[in-house]
């Protein structure tokens, strides 16, 4: 990148966050030195993850506005911290962009990154900016903390646990469907019908479930926890394999948003396909003892959140099955999410 | 990336590091969950940085073997931790590669990444792997720790300090020169003359100065510190601007390696051009009170390291000047490093 570009990036990032946010997160030295320095909180462990989003692989100009790209890159990494029951605190942002990229694109991306960081009290303390040969690529590292020994691992499911999800899965991939159909540059969107807007929103501005993750961590009853980045099927398989248990999902208990129902009907697909194999909902899927579920649902309601029981953990097998409405028990294949239908 | 590729990456990374290394670094949960979890050391602050290397921008197949690419990506990030006087502890590795990339390339890169991580006791605890449209891109995040309040910042230079460098700068860019001249796929190198090998080595396998950084931190006399990623001129400018002081370099005191001297002579360039504007030496440049320099040099000698005094900090100006051999004081322009001569 040229010197001028670096100056622009500095202008978009330096002094961007409130000093009080940096101070309350224990930032000793932020952006501007070889590395950032922060205080640690006694009694807490570090939780850290990183997530990369690549143009044409994870997003296109017809599926996301630049600010959405930034928002979602931050949200995806923050979501991994939520899935540990932890509190996000710091982020580092590395962006590569072609030399001929328009300035506004990068500015929009930084706007989205900071919008999401500010929402979740994440202090941006470092990063890197480089040129790329083609396309924009963003890697976000998020560091958080959790009470000693209290991180919620995906390997902790117990036989007899119920399986829950913290919202309505499948909406993000239905939104992607709509955006690919529309095939219009994202900056010129308009004309979506009321029932379509929440789906587009779910794809472009996913909300990381930090509040839900912290509530689950504080309830003390949650065993395994995962975020839904690759669809319910893939995440349930991860819990099953990591825990050495089976997941039995119950078709009739899986929450289907009315908006997803409507979209699935209009494209003549089974809404369950979106739920099981659509990705990037960034909800949480987890397990807890059956007798603790009602209390958890009440606490979620009180907090304005939802917790849907969608199945059980069993010792009978090591995979994922679905109890269909007709009473049959079917194997759910292990299959990940693929953005644009390319392998 | 396809499922098979993910399995391959898992095979190259899982169980790769000694359990004792992970344990002694306080890793509670490493690769395999949404995020990694680690213990923190009481009395220490966190130090964190990330660094991205992009194919054709930072490396080509004629300038680096795949394992060099991995080694250097890790070394560059570890070097930022060294430049804070800190101890590196954890790394996260995000790699994007084209769908048609050869498996061996990625395997070679992981080999190099782990080779460097093992050398510096860095526990690899997470990362991400995605497809790219073209070229390989690697982002390494390194997290370390330093005694509370003891990080060495680039803004801490004081008037009257000497400026030092922990080795012979300019060798890496001279090595790059040689590799571009040779223009042979790196996996088939050979035929370098004895005096050229250390230069090629400096470019392909830079050694992060963790030992020197820790020694400087423990001496207690070091004020400002920076790593030399963009050439002495650029780094001296960073110290000058961050500290609100001037840096006066002394031409006759700048250490020029015999190998660099020989290469510069053969290509009819001034060796100082490599020193001032060549990059990626990953040495440390810093400042300390003049009366502490001799003691520091003795301690460095005892540890088998070198510390060269190359100039002074002055309150007279806010930039970088060079006292030339002929007695003239010249301004040193602020100019970064550019790998392949492209803007």
Image (spheres, coloured by chain):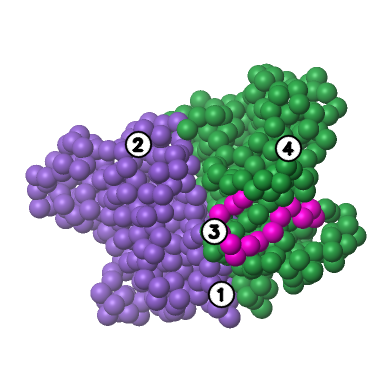
Chain colours: A green, B purple
Image quadrant holding the N terminus of chain B, namely top left
Q: Position of residue B210 (x, y in %)?
A: 38, 68
The Cα atoms of the two marked residues, 3 and 2, are separated by 34 Å
Name the mark nearer the viewer: 4 or 1.
4
Report in which chain the residue with disc 1 lies: B
> Which residue shows up at 71% across the image and 23% down it?
A267
- Secondary structure state at the residue bearing disc 1: loop
The Cα atoms of the two marked residues, 2 and 1, are separated by 37 Å
> How many other residues sit within 10 Å of disc 4, few (<14), some (14-19) or many (≥20)?
many
The Cα atoms of the two marked residues, 3 and 4, are separated by 28 Å
Q: Is residue A290 magenta?
A: no
Discs 4, 1: same chain: no
Residue position marked by numbered label 2 in the rendering: B101
Q: Which of marks 3 and 4 is nearer the N terminus?
A: 4
> Which residue shows up at 50% across the image and 49% down it?
B128
B260 up-or-down from B117: above or below: above
Query: In the picture, residue B10 is in which quadrant?
Result: bottom left
> Which residue shows up at 31% across the image and 55% down it?
B111
Discs 3, 4: same chain: yes
Magenta residues, dominant SS class: strand
Report in which chain the residue with disc 3 lies: A
Give residue A318's mark: 3
Name the mark nearer the viewer: 4 or 2.
4
Q: Give the range drawn in magenta.
A: A307-321
Q: Could you say which is closer to the camera, residue B222 or residue A230?
A: A230
- Secondary structure state at the residue bearing disc 3: loop
Q: In this view, does A278 lie to the left or right of A5?
A: right
Report in which chain the residue with disc 2 lies: B
Report in which chain the residue with disc 4 lies: A
> Which residue shows up at 40% across the image and 44% down it?
B5
Q: Could you say which is closer to the camera, residue A67 or residue B255?
A: A67
Number of marks in the image? 4
């Amino acid at each position: 990148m040229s010197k001028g570009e670096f100056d622009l990036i500095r202008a978009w990032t330096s002094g961007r966050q409130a000093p009080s946010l940096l101070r309350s997160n224990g930032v000793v030295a932020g952006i501007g030195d070889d590395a950032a320095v922060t205080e640690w909180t006694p009694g807490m462990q570090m939780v850290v993850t990183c997530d990369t989003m690549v143009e044409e692989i994870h997003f296109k100009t017809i599926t996301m506005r630049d600010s959405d790209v930034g928002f979602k890159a931050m949200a995806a990494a923050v979501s991994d911290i939520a899935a540990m029951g932890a509190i996000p605190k710091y982020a580092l942002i590395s962006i590569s962009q072609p030399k001929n990229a328009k300035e506004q694109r990068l500015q929009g991306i930084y706007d989205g990154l900071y919008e999401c960081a500010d929402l979740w009290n994440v202090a941006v303390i470092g990063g890197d900016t480089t040129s790329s040969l083609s396309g924009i690529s963003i890697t976000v590292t998020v560091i958080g903390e959790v009470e000693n020994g209290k991180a919620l691992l995906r390997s902790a499911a117990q036989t007899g646990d119920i399986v829950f999800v913290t919202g309505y899965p499948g909406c993000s991939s239905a939104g992607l469907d709509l955006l690919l159909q529309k095939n219009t540059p994202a900056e010129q969107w308009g004309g979506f019908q009321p029932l379509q807007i929440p789906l587009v929103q779910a794809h472009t501005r996913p909300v990381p479930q930090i509040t839900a993750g912290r509530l689950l961590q504080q309830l003390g009853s949650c065993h395994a926890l995962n975020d839904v980045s690759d669809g319910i099927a893939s995440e349930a398989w991860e819990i099953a394999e990591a825990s050495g248990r089976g997941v039995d999902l119950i078709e009739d208990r899986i929450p289907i948003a009315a908006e997803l129902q409507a979209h699935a009907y209009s494209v003549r697909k089974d809404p369950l396909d979106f739920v099981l194999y659509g990705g990037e909902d960034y909800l949480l899927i987890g397990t807890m003892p059956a007798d603790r579920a009602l209390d958890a649902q009440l606490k979620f309601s009180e907090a304005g959140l939802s917790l849907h029981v969608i199945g059980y953990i069993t010792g009978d097998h090591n995979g994922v099955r679905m109890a269909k409405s007709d009473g049959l028990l079917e194997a759910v294949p292990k299959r990940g999410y693929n953005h644009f239908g390319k392998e």
